[in-house]
Image: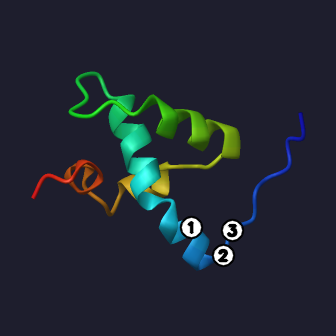
Amino acid sequence: MDERKLQLGDVQETALIPLSNRATETLRKKPRVQDPKAVQVIKELNIETSKFDKTITHESAIGVF
């Protein structure tokens, strides 16, 4: 498998925020939403999600307002 790092522009990276948050929420100890496909996609793309977790709440990822 090719281990190159995916290079994304600002628009492409911003589009991944909801997916990233759904994946992160799924991996929590007591997730409010479970989206194994989001986890799979983030892992396959080898995306670092920690930078998204600092500014976006998990509620925005699951549509709770």
The quadrant in which the C terminus is found is bottom left
Q: Alpha carbon of mark 2 to alpha carbon of mark 1: how far?
A: 6 Å
For label 3, the crowd category at 10 Å Cα-Cα, with few meaning under 14, some 14 to 19 and many 20 or more, is few
Q: What residue type is labelled 1?
A: Glu
Pointer 1: what residue? 13
Q: Where is residue 23 in the image (x, y as percent from the top left)?
A: 43, 39
Q: Is residue 64 left or right of residue 40?
A: left
Q: Residue at x 32, y 63 (%)?
A: 55
Q: Which residue is drawn at 37% across and 53% down?
A: 53
Q: Which of marks 3 and 1 is nearer the N terminus?
A: 3
Pointer 2: what residue? 9
Q: Which amino acid does label 3 sit on?
A: Leu
Please, is residue 15 above or below residue 53 in the view?
below
Q: Which residue is drawn at 90% across and 40% down?
A: 2
Pointer 3 with pointer 1, Cβ within 8 A: yes
Q: In this view, does 5 lie to the left or right of 60?
A: right
